[in-house]
Image (cartoon, rainbow, N blue to C red):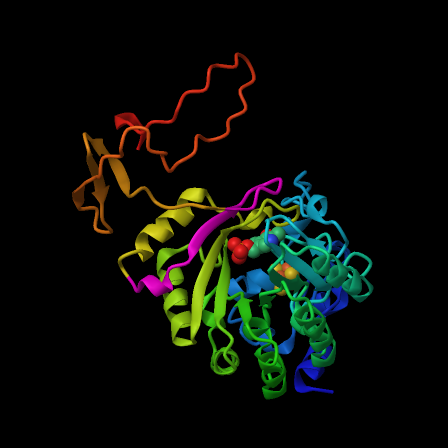
Amino acid sequence: MELWQEMLRQSVDSGKDLVERFSFDPEMAERLNKLFHIRINPYYLSLIRYPGDPIWLQCIPDSQELEEDDLPEDPLAEDAHSPVPSIVHRYPDRVLFLTTSQCSMYCRFCTRKRKVGDSTKINMRYIQDGIDYIAAHPEIRDIILSGGDPLMLTDYMLEKILKGLREIPHVEIIRLGTKMPCVLPQRVTPKLCKMLKKYHPIYVNTHFNHPWECTPEAKSSCGMLADAGVPVGNQAVLMKGVNDDPDIMLELMRKLLTMRVRPYYLYQADITKGANHFRTPVSVGLDIMDKLRGHTSGLAIPHFVIDAPGGGGKIPLLPQYVLGKNGNQVILRNYKYDIYTYPDVESEPGEATREPEPKVTRKKKTRKKKQYKPDKEQV
Ligand SMILES: *Cc1c(COP(=O)(O)O)cnc(C)c1O
Ligand code: SF4
């Protein structure tokens, strides 16, 4: 058995553990355990500094998960975009491929709580169906292995999947969405890296949320992946009490760059049943973006996105940098809120405007469609 597998076996993973190690009320611990899996491996557990700290909040269950919140279990309508159980096909040219229901740590804010940890919903027996689906759809060129955490699979099983995918000529890139470099960095071994290298181009997107997670062990695992030629990106989730603070986020993004990890997305927390207590106002995310851009390396700046409720995909949000238009002068502000004007280029009459008219479903009168024309009011 490899070290990481050994460590997994020593995880806190039951209501009984919560009672014994964290003095939970036994009845509450059982209810929480029934609601969503508990697993905190000894490495991640060691990062906790005090009860209720940003690491604790991410991994130790909380009574707020039990609140009757009437929120959806599948906020992104992934099931509606799932042609076979292991595939979520929302975008034209890429798919999520759910390969295992297991994670080395169950995040309390997980958006896929309804499926993760439940092997009747995500199961290895659906893997062949997934590969067959991808093979039958030549428009799919980008595969994102997800789950659960695909690095919970053994190297042997993972290689079987990668090999299967690489036999499909239209598959261009393969991404692994894994939290392991953050939660169980011991999973990234020389043997794993050597295997991954055979199936390039491979990308990894990992998931750090707080600077305390940027340990020497984590740095070493990200470095090994980078040395194997795997570009590593980070997808963070904005969460109340964890990282909803511009200084913490700045520190996290800078630390990631020193670990050779490129910030990719910053997600607004999804509206998920049992995870509502993590949500922050949209303005908090915009404020963070405002305090990153210009104040630190452009490389440290992720895209702030909201995954549209109901399954519309990721929508980027930016602070307002365009303040208006005066004739052909575009009025802009920089990161210090200094104002600048930029003389725009007049578009030729009849030239196609770049922005399409937004699709609005009008309920009452259907008015005659007007050609979209940028004007003073509309910037
Ligand atoms: C996030 C996501 C992707 C990948 O999106 P990118 O913007 O290409 O990183 C693909 N499919 C689904 C269903 C997703 O949620
Ligand atoms: S690692 Fe990902 S899939 Fe697993 S519990 Fe955390 S957020 Fe959910």
Instruction: Residue 54 in the image: state x and y as whole percent.
Output: 50, 63
Q: Is residue 162 left or right of residue 202?
A: right
> Quadrant holding ligand 1?
bottom right
Q: Is residue 341 left or right of residue 78?
A: left
- Magenta region: which residues? 296-314
Quadrant position of the N terminus in the picture: bottom right
Work out whether residue 204 or residue 256 is closer to the camera in this orientation and state it.
204
In the rendered view, tell whether residue 341 sits above or below residue 111. Answer: above
Instruction: Residue 300 in the image: state x and y as whole percent.
Output: 37, 64
In the rendered view, tell whether residue 201 sits above or below residue 31. Answer: below
Quadrant position of the C terminus in the picture: top left
In the rendered view, tell whether residue 226 sits above or below residue 144. Answer: below
Magenta stretch: residue 346 in it?
A: no
Q: How many marks?
A: 0
Residue sitting at x 70%, y 61%: 98
Q: Is residue 317 left or right of residue 197?
A: left
Work out whether residue 128 or residue 265 is closer to the camera in this orientation and state it.
128
Instruction: Residue 217 in the image: state x and y as whole percent.
Output: 51, 82
Residue sitting at x 17%, y 46%: 338
| Residue 181 quadrant | bottom right
In the rendered view, tell whether residue 185 sits above or below residue 16. Answer: below
Q: Is residue 107 visible?
A: no
Residue sitting at x 48%, y 83%: 227
Residue sitting at x 73%, y 78%: 9
Q: Residue furthest top?
A: 365
